[in-house]
Image (spheres, rainbow, N blue to C red):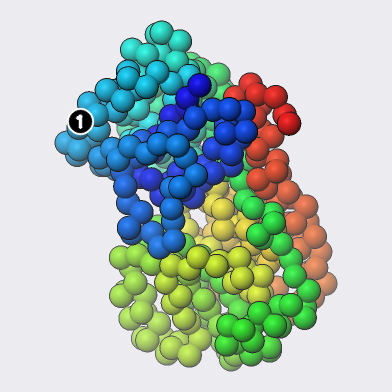
Amino acid sequence: MKVLLTATVQSHICQFHKPLVEILHSHGYEVHVAARNNLAEKNGLKLDFVDKVFDIPFARSPKSKDNLRAYKELKKIIEKEQYKVIHCNTPMGGIVTRLAARKVRKKGTKVYYTAHGFHFYKGAPKKNWIVFYPIEKIFSRITDRLITITQEDYELASQKFHCKVEHIHGVGVDGQRYYPVSIEEKVSLKKEFGFLEKEKLILCVGELLPNKNQKMIIYAMTNIVKQYSNAKLLLAGNGPEKKKLEELIISNHLENNVFMLGYVTNLQEYQKMADVCVTCSKREGLPLNVVEAMLSGTLVVASKNRGHRELIHDGETGFLVDIDDYNSLSKAILILLTDKEVYEKIETNAKNYAQAYTFTNVKKELTKVYGLKNE
């Protein structure tokens, strides 16, 4: 028996679907992947846990002619390999795959699609509803099972779409990798990475893109350093906004307080030694870095968006602030840096809440979605 996983890029499968592959392998399935090979851009990522990989020229842009090539190549593979399940991901990967699988679906192949956050949601631009909502609703007719990772998406799809809809708690985070450490271990980690024990570490994880909005936390640092001159902001990630952010750091005289780490493969170490994790995105599906921080015992201050609201209940499992309100962001961070009682209360709530998003729980949910037996 064989299952095909598709996505626009191979890094998506590497980052988000190893738990699913482990489940399928444990039940005797052969797992293939079809996606564009972008792993050279992603330090340390390897697609070495599946049985066969096809390099398919998917493109993120619907206007790209590469998607027509991808459709033709994928259709041949699907008709040759005879998969029991075809499980697609990402907007264009999902559209092209479902079109390519129409013929075999009529012969019994099941087609699943995981929505990692619809482009239409409460508060989304009107054009998103006009363009993306009708497309997803139409394509639900050639989908056997739609898997959502946010409650908001689940409720909408259950009411409006034409296929069976399931909800799972994201793609899973490794609870054996992200966990709290003692004060002594935290101090030891700081020293190992060249930080002083008394320095306050603020971590911000994400690609350097306009949507990730790192400029918001850089502006907030101008307030934070007035109270904690030894505070350090660590920006983990790379991307096209790097130069602009570097210029912003210099123009605000924060060269000694803000550090760009680039793409890191040992993110769990930074999560464990950070005092606060910050995310300023304008849009999110279900951000893994927030779950990773919560499991690590690192409190989160996040901008208000659909994905952050799913995880952060303001004042209970973290703090939420309006997008681009860097004054409120800095105030929330300062509360967590100064009020030990508030910190410990929220830390306990956050760790308990995040357990639903671990590999252990998500594997159980995926096993149920596939109709497999729990081992």
Residue 320 percent coordinates (x, y): 61, 59
Q: Quadrant of residue 22?
A: top right
Query: Residue 213: in sight, yes or no?
Result: no
Q: Residue at x 45, y 43 (%)?
A: 13
Q: Quadrant of residue 237?
A: bottom left
Instruction: Tell me: residue 315, above or below residue 255.
Output: above
Quadrant placement of the C terminus: top right
Q: Residue at x 48, y 82 (%)?
A: 258
Q: Residue at x 50, y 65 (%)?
A: 265
The three-letter amino acid code for the residue at tag 1 is Leu
Residue 82 percent coordinates (x, y): 40, 18
Residue 73 percent coordinates (x, y): 24, 29
Instruction: Tell me: residue 114, above or below residue 259.
Output: above
In this picture, residue 119 sits left or right of residue 75: right
Disc 1 target residue: 68
Residue 332 percent coordinates (x, y): 64, 70
Q: Residue furthest top?
A: 107
Relative to the observer, which residue lies in front, 208 or 182?
182
Q: Residue at x 59, y 72 (%)?
A: 270
Q: Callout 1 environment at 10 Å: few (<14), some (14 to 19), or many (20+)?
A: some
Query: Residue 25: in sight, yes or no?
Result: yes
Q: Secondary structure at mark 1?
A: helix
Relative to the observer, which residue lies in front, 255 or 36?
36
Instruction: Tell me: residue 42, above or below residue 6.
Output: below
Instruction: Tell me: residue 184, above or below residue 59.
Output: below
